[in-house]
Amino acid sequence: MTGLRHSSYDIAIIGAGPAGLTAGMYSARQGLTTVIVAAEVGGQAAWADKIENYIGWDVISGRELIARFREHVRQFDVDCLEGQLVNAIVPAEDGFDLYTREGESVHTRAVIIATGRSINRLAVPGEAELLGRGVSYCATCDGAFFRGQPVAIVGSTESAADAALELANLDATVTLVSPSPLKAPETVLANVHASPAITVRTGVKVLAIEGESRVTGLTIRDNATKTEESIPVNGVFIETGSIPASEYTGGIVEMNERGEIIVDKSCATNVPGIYAAGDVTDGFGKQIIIAAGEGARASMAASKDLKRR
């Protein structure tokens, strides 16, 4: 992947995680001038310590998988603006203009948004340092590595409750930590409270995630009594939601109440010429393999549309 070589592109892909990199490869293979614009290559997939559910590898680290994706894309004619954060998509003649925070601009006939999820982080000591070493933002992705172990789920929404139930089904001992009462359907809450493997702690604040090379505990403070305590856990799953993509789309594409871009079965948005793939969409299943597949689908659909034009 190189810098810009054209004044205009057939397809510009925003994001360089599994969805974006796959979309870039498929677009170039179809003979389209292609550029990927991304703040960083890899996305959340690069954080994973171990991945055991990507077909073709029994176990592989997120960094290694992304390195292989990147090397594969390098074999094709794909330009890349790395270290550039898109902050505006503006409709223009015969397509769109993309503008980055760093001052670059790209004209393109079609856009594929593949920026993944921007996680609402806790911003506490130990979170960044232990990411991929016990700290995770995806119970479905990493829960199996903590089968039968003590873990903590941090969050107050249905996704936190679902994560607690998922870990409990793996025989983990779960402490669900929330600053406020849980907000989830009554049936979900009933299942959480009925599970002997789940302890719910509401009205508490996370102060730090403990550990050196791996997570060993979670420091919390009771908001009412102001007392602090340490909970021994081997994993911390952060389920605090994500930042919606509306910050850079300017509201031109339709989104749901969670800030996810609504797409149809071909990954097209409500705006002709704009597609979306991966975790940024309202599609079910936030998984690396699904994101990669959606990147391919979005590219194929955009290519078909461009050739019709």
Image: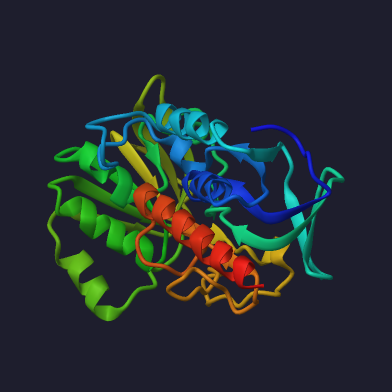
- 170, 189: nearer the viewer: 170
Q: Quadrant of the N terminus?
A: top right
- What percent of the width, then of the height, locates residue 220? 43, 44
Viewer-proximal residue, 255 or 66? Answer: 66
Residue 120's place in the image compared with 52, above or below, is: below
Q: Is residue 224 visible?
A: no
Along the horizontal axis of the image, is 303 left or right of 85? left
Q: Nearer the viewer, residue 174 or 227?
A: 174
Residue drawn 52% across and 74% down? 262
Residue placed farthest to the top in the image?
Answer: 213
**Count of numbered circles on the image:** 0
> What's the residue at 14%, 40% (across, down)?
148
| As drawn, 191 above or below 234 | below
Which colour assignment does the render follow?
rainbow
* Front residue (pair 207, 172): 172
User: Which image quadrant for residue 194?
Assistant: bottom left
Quarter of the image that includes the C terminus: bottom right
Relative to residue 246, is residue 268 drawn left or right? left
Q: Position of residue 99 (x, y in %)?
A: 81, 54
Q: In percent of the image, x 35 and y 74: which residue is there? A: 184
From the viewer's perspective, is 210 left or right of 152?
right
Task: Using residue 120 as the reference point, say whether residue 65 is left or right of it.
Answer: left
Q: Position of residue 261 (x, y in %)?
A: 55, 70
The spot of residue 171 in percent (x, y) is: 12, 47
> Residue drawn at (56%, 36%), measured in percent from left and top?
76
Q: For residue 87, which quarter of the picture?
A: bottom right
| Residue 264 visible in the displayed image | yes
